[in-house]
Amino acid sequence: MSIRPILIHPDPRLKKVCTPFEGVDTAARKLADDMLETMYDAPGVGLAAPQVGILSRLFVMDCAGKEETPEPLALINPEITWASEELNTHEEGCLSIPEQYEEVTRPAEVKVRYLNLDGQIEERHFAGLAATCAQHEIDHLNGKLFIDYLSRIKRSMITTRMKKLKADRARAL
Ligand code: NI
């Protein structure tokens, strides 16, 4: 396993609609392993393939609490098959938009169908933080970021901060 660099917004690769996998092979499993390691290292609760520059439909997540047993999940070609009418507002952040947290309102519960790492179809029901996380990560696969839910002015403030962060990091190299 290896840690991969995480792209920081703004980056054109974070705005692309990603391509489905045709099957689950060794390369897909290796990518999922690397992404989990990268996510735990960051640390974060979710990471989508485009955030490491791979424009394929895969994300990983682990929303288990600090005192709970880790629950790593890799979801390939995920699709939301059901969303609750009830909404939930959660403060969201993103490893591609470090240190920025804003409230986003989304369906409180969702069902997601996907391929697991054995290539089998699974469906899971997510609620609470996991529901927010799964929707945030699926958005990534469609080139959408959580800041796209904010006002134009908030979004442009955050984008300006991220441009500065990238410039500072480039100078530090
Ligand atoms: Ni994100």
Image (cartoon, grey):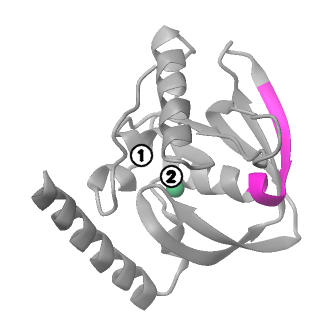
Identify residue type, mark 2: His
Determine the residue positioned at 34% across, 61% down. Answer: 9
Determine the residue positioned at 74% across, 16% down. Answer: 120
| Residue that carries the numbered disc 1 in the rendered image | 51
In the image, residue 162 above or below residue 47: below
Q: Position of residue 99 (x, y in %)?
A: 46, 68
Asked whether mark 2 and ligand 1 are closer than 8 Å, the reply comes as yes
| Residue that carries the numbered disc 2 in the rendered image | 140
Numbered disc total: 2
Dominant SS of magenta comes to strand
- The image quadrant that residue 168 belongs to is bottom left
Contact between marks 1 and 2 (CB within 8 A): the answer is yes
Crowding at mark 2 (Cα within 10 Å: few <14, some 14-19, many 20+): many
Q: Where is residue 58 in the image (x, y as percent from the top left)?
A: 55, 34
CA–CA distance in space, label 1 to label 2: 8 Å
Please, which residue is most extreme toward the front here?
67
In the image, residue 159 above or below residue 75: below
Q: Position of residue 49 (x, y in %)?
A: 46, 38
User: From which residue to which does the magenta span run?
Assistant: 122-131
Please, which residue is most extreme toward the top here?
26
